Amino acid sequence: DDEHVRLELRLGRQPIEVWALSTPEPPHRYGLISGFRRLTVARSLGFPTIPAFLRHPESVADAMQAMVSENEQRSDLSPYERARILTAAVDEGIFTTLDEAIATLHPQANPTKRTRLRAMASVVEALGPCLRRPEALSQQLLLRIAAAVHQGFEPVLRAALTEHGDIAPEAQTRRIATILAEAEAEARAP
């Protein structure tokens, strides 16, 4: 139909970017640098192929840096998504430390932004699997949660987030609000 043709034309105008994996694991021969959403749409519509530019980054770290840069320009990554990319890059062994990942993937970040990224990454590491729709959390809320985790409130937060099974994101936020208030009060007057 006409809509299918229009989508096909749009996908062709903006090719995705890939690099050849040094150790491909069938069926995966390429790593994706940019175009995740376009690739997802193409797959959901049943396209067997999608136009792509083959790039030759010096390393996986360079490919990651290009991916993050492209995502920062094209889409509004949430604070949680930024932090999740950093922790995933360290977990996958692309970088040995979180600071190395931050320095490479966010080279223009000032010291304050680096500190915030580090703090939000601590939330991903501590509570990521417990959070429902974490990409909807504001930077301010993530930083409040990070401060509470740093103060030793992680077990209490984890219990509050998982106690009643799969609860809605809004209910999770309400549930941890009192814990965050307690952590903040304790920080002001230990």
Image: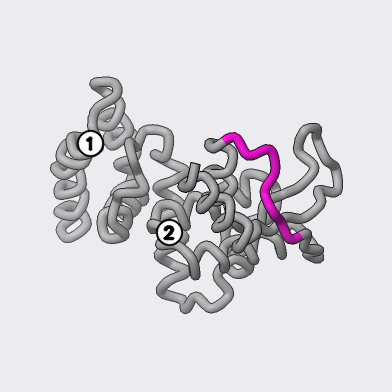
Q: Say whether residue 55 is left or right of residue 121.
A: right
The residue that disc 1 covers is 172
The residue that disc 2 covers is 77
Placement of 175 over or under 90, stated as above or below:
above
Q: In the image, what residue occupies the spot 65% across and 57% down? A: 16
Q: Secondary structure at mark 2?
A: loop
Q: Secondary structure at mark 1?
A: helix
Q: Position of residue 171 (x, y in %)?
A: 18, 35
Q: Nearer the viewer, mark 1 or mark 2?
A: 2
Q: Is residue 144 magenta?
A: no
Placement of 92 over or under 35, stated as above or below:
above
Q: Position of residue 158 (x, y in %)?
A: 32, 33
Q: Position of residue 157 (x, y in %)?
A: 28, 37
Q: Which mark is residue 66?
A: none
Disc with the residue nearer the chain's start (1 vs 2): 2
53, 142: nearer the viewer: 53
Q: Say whether residue 45 is left or right of residue 134.
A: right
Task: Kindly indicate whether the residue at mark 2 contacts the one at mark 1 (C-beta within 8 angstroms).
Answer: no
Q: In the image, what residue occupies the spot 46% across and 47% down? A: 3
The boundaries of the magenta stretch are 46-53
Q: Quadrant of residue 104?
A: bottom right
Question: Is residue 151 at all visible to an observer of this figure?
Answer: no
